[in-house]
Image (cartoon, grey):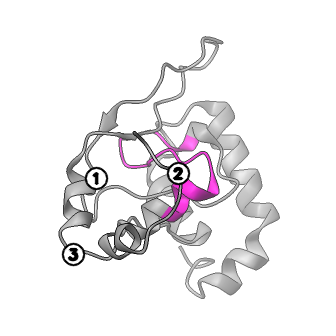
Amino acid sequence: GFHAERRPAEESELTNADLVPFLRSLPIFELHRAAPPDGEAAPAPAGECVPLQRGVHCVAPPGVPESLLAGGRFVRSGSESERRLLRFLGVEQPARSAFFRSHVFGRLAELPAEARDGAMVSVLRELHALGSEDAGFVDS
């Protein structure tokens, strides 16, 4: 049967170098889906579950609207324990400034109007903090 108690042997296995590649290879990580086009109120269906690829998949910075997370790169994480697991597996979380530079500014024309406008308002509200986080942000 399943035992909920922790055992030292089980915890030491979590540091085993073979465990991380195995866990990353499992198609159990849900990705964020594209938002519906402008004017459509239908909720987006559940995201696709995939194995993790280093350098491809990442976790969105806190507070980023889901409408900006399309594209098959962003892994859904609903709890702190899931975020800890993703960190353990080497999934990176870009800073907000890097997120806007890499995943929003180059896609402004293809984003739904509401998502685009919301993103730009967020950037303007956070401009000082984003500039402090990344000295080149204001120049981009």
Mark 3: amino acid: Ala
Mark 2: amino acid: Ala
Q: Residue furthest right?
A: 125
Residue 94 badge: none
Secondary structure under tag 1 reads loop
Is 18 or 68 nearer to us in this picture? 18
Q: Which residues are magenta?
A: 68-84
Residue 25 location, x and y as percent? Answer: 20, 51
Q: Please, what is the dominant secondary structure of the magenta stretch? A: loop
Mark 1: amino acid: Leu
Q: Residue at x 78, y 78 (%)?
A: 128
Give left or right: position of 61 versus 86: right
Question: Disc 1 marks which residue?
Answer: 52
Q: Residue at x 68, y 32 (%)?
A: 114
Residue 3 location, x and y as percent? Answer: 47, 49
Residue 76 location, x and y as percent? Answer: 50, 44
Magenta-span inclusion, residue 5: no
Q: Residue at x 60, y 20 (%)?
A: 38
**Which numbered disc, 2 or 3, marks the residue closer to the eye?**
2
Label 2 vs 3, first from the N-terminus: 2
Question: Disc 2 marks which residue?
Answer: 4
Image quarter (top left, top right, bottom left or bottom right) of the N terminus: top left
Give left or right: position of 39 versus 8: right
* 58 to 115, vertically: above or below: below
Image quadrant of residue 129? bottom right
Residue 17 badge: 3
10 Å crowding of disc 2: few (<14), some (14-19), many (20+): few
Magenta-span inclusion, residue 82: yes
Secondary structure under tag 3 reads loop
* 137 to 132, vertically: above or below: above
